């Protein structure tokens, strides 16, 4: 697959509250096309909220989020924009337990309206990319933690996203498996030219990223170039 | 999508089965009642065309055709009408045979075309002027009665002159007495239930019926089975009961599906949030939930159709009318049962599906 240019991401003075809790305050951030940014911070510092807002899973109370210079997260079109632009990887793999690995990877392609046979072929190719071709018909319960996360990565890549958002993708994995999963994410990012925003406590992530930003109590306090 | 719907339905098999069972009961009741009324319609067809007649003349404004009473003098007036070639009076006596209460005893003129049309399969028609009975072959088999034997009707014993077959179910499941004898035991001397009429060639039954009703005020002419059912209060009651059961089935089944699917949506918020996250539109997620609602209803409807076929027979037995009503399963009856099942799923799926469209992906993912 030929690399696709990841989009630039611009956040201007973004704030978000949940009831009385301020999750993000006045956050401004720019990611260049194809850049890999690691977001660090303590639990509750707003990392996951920031990632969710970038991916259009919720709307900021104030401020703006531009992807490739456009405000794509309008209520009317956000499902389509997510489908065409963004791939998500979560700490909890969130695989559908009753479906096989292949069928899980096919789920985003159903949303895209892809034909059955094409879906199947695409899913199998992606599972091969993440080294799970021989586990395609296994359900999640029959896979190890690392394998499940690799299936989740394959699913995130199904619609060929240009922006990959990963929320603590190694948080539930042991050190060796974490290394494997991070290797895979960064290899895929390099190969596909995706813009990558990755939330993690893991030092290994900051080492691999182009830049690390640190959040404290919802505010962006420092940016560290690699 | 279909694959996801089916796997989700079997994720909690007990819940799916119990919900489907509730729907099945509703659908089964509808199918059973429809098969019963369809059977009743077939019976009514025989009732209208007793003795192979073209139509039957009854008393107007009675709750049930069998409660009609007409004066015997009316027979002569009908015979005088140009549309009529033959007319003969019939008195229907119900619950007259203790051992087979559903059997009908027909009081008929021995020389009338009703009696003459019976095919004697054993014995004779009996000599005129006697009190001998003719017994239908079905009833004879049930009571083990033969020509030359006796049959008890309204507490009196009558000699059996012969056993007949007519091809009309409840004629064959009944017996025939001379009209005067039947009038005496029923306490209706000079009266009959109806007058069966044969029409002249080329005369349409519906047109002749209207002319007869005008010529003989106070009569009601029944020319087709559906008309007979409409006239009968019991049949009307059954039709209304079906409507009530359909409405109850839709409400109870719909609520049951809505409850099941709403619980499922609550439990699977993270999963549904994930579908939004990977780009499924709210409409597509709603269709998934809606499809699961319809899916569980289809399972229920399939079970209900099977149960209804069995239930139709049980209903007939429970009402004690099995000797003259046989449940009739029609494709349209089953189709209506299936449609009701699908409608239950659609009604029940609306609210959970709508609810899904109101969830934001972030809150759904967080399970809040």
Image (cartoon, coloured by chain):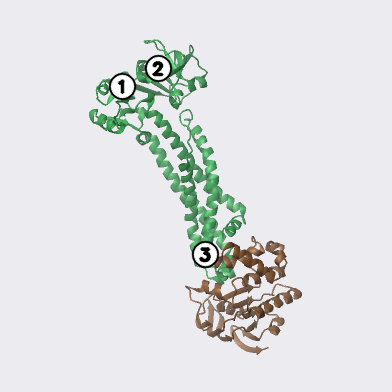
- 3D distance between C-alphas at marks 1 and 3: 69 Å
Q: Which residue shows up at 38% across the image and 18% down it?
A: B116
Q: Residues within 10 Å of mark 2 (few under 14, many from 20)?
A: many
Q: In this view, does B293 lie above or below A42?
A: above
Do the dots labelled 2 and 1 sit on one chain? yes
Q: Is mark 1 on a helix, strand or loop?
A: strand
- 3D distance between C-alphas at marks 2 and 3: 71 Å
Chain A painted colour: brown
Protein chain holding label 3: B
Protein chain holding label 2: B
Q: How crowded is mark 3: few (under 14 residues within 10 Å), some or many (20 or more)?
A: some
Residue at the farthest left position:
B215
Q: Name the residue under label 3.
A: B284
Which comes before the other along the chain, label 2 or label 3? 2
- Circle number at residue B86: 1
Of residues B140 and B102, the one drawn nearer to the viewer in this rendering: B140
Q: The green chain is which one?
A: B
């Amino acid at each position: 697959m030929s690399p696709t240019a990841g989009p630039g991401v611009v956040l201007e003075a973004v704030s978000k509250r949940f009831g009385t809790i301020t999750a993000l305050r006045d956050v401004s951030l720019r990611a260049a096309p194809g850049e890999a940014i690691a977001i660090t911070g303590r639990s509750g510092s707003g990392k996951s909220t920031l990632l969710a807002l970038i991916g259009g899973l919720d709307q900021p109370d104030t401020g703006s989020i531009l992807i490739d210079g456009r405000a794509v997260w309008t209520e009317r079109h956000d499902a389509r924009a997510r489908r065409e632009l963004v791939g998500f990887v979560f700490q909890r793999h969130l695989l559908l337990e009753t479906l096989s690995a292949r069928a899980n990877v096919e789920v985003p392609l159903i949303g895209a309206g892809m034909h059955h046979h094409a879906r199947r072929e695409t899913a199998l190719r992606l599972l091969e990319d993440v080294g799970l071709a021989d586990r395609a018909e296994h359900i999640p319960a029959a896979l190890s933690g690392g394998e499940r996360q690799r299936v989740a990565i394959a699913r995130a890549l199904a619609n060929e996203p240009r922006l990959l958002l990963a929320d603590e993708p190694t948080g539930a994995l042991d050190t060796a498996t974490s290394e494997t999963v991070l290797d895979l994410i960064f290899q895929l990012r390099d190969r596909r030219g995706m813009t990558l925003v990755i939330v993690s406590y893991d030092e290994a992530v900051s080492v691999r990223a182009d830049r690390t930003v640190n959040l404290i109590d919802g505010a962006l306090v420092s940016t560290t170039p690699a | 999508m279909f694959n996801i719907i089916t796997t989700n339905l079997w994720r909690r098999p007990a819940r799916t089965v119990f919900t489907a069972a509730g729907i099945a009961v509703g659908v089964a009741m509808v199918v059973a009642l429809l098969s019963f009324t369809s059977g009743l319609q077939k019976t009514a067809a025989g009732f209208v065309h007793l003795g192979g007649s073209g139509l039957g003349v009854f008393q107007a404004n009675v709750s049930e055709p069998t409660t009609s009473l007409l004066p015997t003098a009316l027979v002569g007036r009908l015979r005088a009408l140009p549309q009529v070639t033959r007319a003969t009076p019939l008195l229907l006596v119900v619950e007259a045979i203790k051992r087979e209460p559903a059997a009908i005893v027909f009081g008929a003129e021995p020389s009338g075309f009703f009696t003459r049309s019976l095919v004697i399969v054993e014995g004779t028609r009996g000599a005129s002027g006697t009190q001998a009975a003719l017994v239908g072959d079905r009833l004879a088999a049930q009571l083990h009665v033969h020509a030359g034997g006796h049959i008890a009707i309204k507490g009196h014993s009558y000699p059996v002159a012969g056993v007949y077959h007519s091809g009309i179910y409840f004629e064959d499941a009944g017996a025939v007495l001379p009209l005067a004898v039947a009038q005496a035991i029923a306490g209706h001397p000079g009266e009959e239930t109806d007058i069966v009429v044969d029409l002249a060639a080329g005369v349409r039954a519906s047109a002749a019926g209207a002319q007869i009703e005008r010529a003989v005020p106070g009569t009601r002419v029944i020319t087709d089975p559906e008309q007979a059912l409409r006239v009968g209060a019991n049949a009307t009651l059954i039709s209304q009961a079906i409507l009530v059961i359909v409405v109850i089935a839709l409400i109870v089944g719909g609520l049951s599906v809505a409850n099941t699917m709403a619980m499922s949506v609550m439990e699977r918020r993270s999963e549904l949030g994930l579908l939004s996250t990977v780009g499924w539109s709210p409409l597509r997620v709603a269709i998934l939930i809606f499809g699961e609602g319809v899916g569980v209803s289809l399972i229920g409807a399939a079970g209900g159709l099977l149960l209804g076929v069995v239930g139709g027979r049980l209903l007939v037995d429970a009402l004690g009318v099995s000797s003259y009503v046989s449940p009739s399963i029609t494709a349209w009856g089953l189709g209506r049962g299936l449609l009701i099942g699908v409608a239950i799923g659609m009604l029940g799926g609306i609210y959970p599906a709508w609810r899904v469209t109101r969830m934001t992906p972030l809150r759904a993912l967080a399970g809040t």
